[in-house]
């Protein structure tokens, strides 16, 4: 008889993050109204993976610089939480 181990499988959140759902609904409303014309996104999945993407835009420089600003905001918020 061989030694067998029982290994617990990782569990992932199955409940929706209400803040995320609200933000996505607001963004979808603005896109349908024509206010948002392109998007770049980075998402964290319940499986602890990342999902990234973007849509084309005539003003790629604005999109790239906005991502740099977003990165700065995320790092700043993280630093505040760590303090």
Image (cartoon, rainbow, N blue to C red):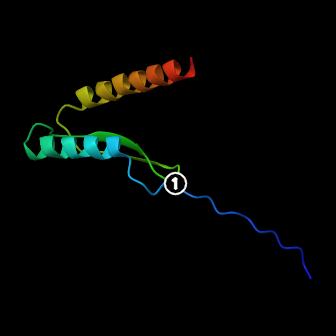
Note whether 55 is above or below 60 in the view shown: below
Quadrant location of residue 27?
Answer: top left
Note whether 62 is above or below 14 in the view shown: above
Q: Residue at x 38, y 46 (%)?
A: 17
Image coordinates for residue 46, horizontal then vertical, percent: 48, 52
Q: From the viewer's perspective, tell me whether residue 14 is left or right of residue 82.
A: left
The one of 36 and 58 positioned closer to us in this rendering:
36
Note whether 63 is above or below 77 in the view shown: below
Crowding near pointer 1: few (<14 within 10 Å), some, many (20+)? few
Quadrant location of residue 83?
Answer: top right
Image coordinates for residue 73, horizontal then vertical, percent: 39, 22
- The quadrant of the picture occupied by the N terminus is bottom right
Image coordinates for residue 11, horizontal then vertical, percent: 57, 58
Q: Residue at x 15, y 38 (%)?
A: 36
Q: Residue at x 7, y 43 (%)?
A: 33
Q: From the viewer's perspective, tell me whether residue 5 is left or right of residue 29.
A: right
Note whether 3 is above or below 10 in the view shown: below
Image coordinates for residue 81, horizontal then vertical, percent: 52, 23
Res. 58 visible in picture: yes
Res. 53 visible in picture: no
Q: Farthest residue in the left direction?
A: 33
Q: Which residue is mark 1?
A: 47
Label 1: state its secondary structure: loop
């Amino acid at each position: 008889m061989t030694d067998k181990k029982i290994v617990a499988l990782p569990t992932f959140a199955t409940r929706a993050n209400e803040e995320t759902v609200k933000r996505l609904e607001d963004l979808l409303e603005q896109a349908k109204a024509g206010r948002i014309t392109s998007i770049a996104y980075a998402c964290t999945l319940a499986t602890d993976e990342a999902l990234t993407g973007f849509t084309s835009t005539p003003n790629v420089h604005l999109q790239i610089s906005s991502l740099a600003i977003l990165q700065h905001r995320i790092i700043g918020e993280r630093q505040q939480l760590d303090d």
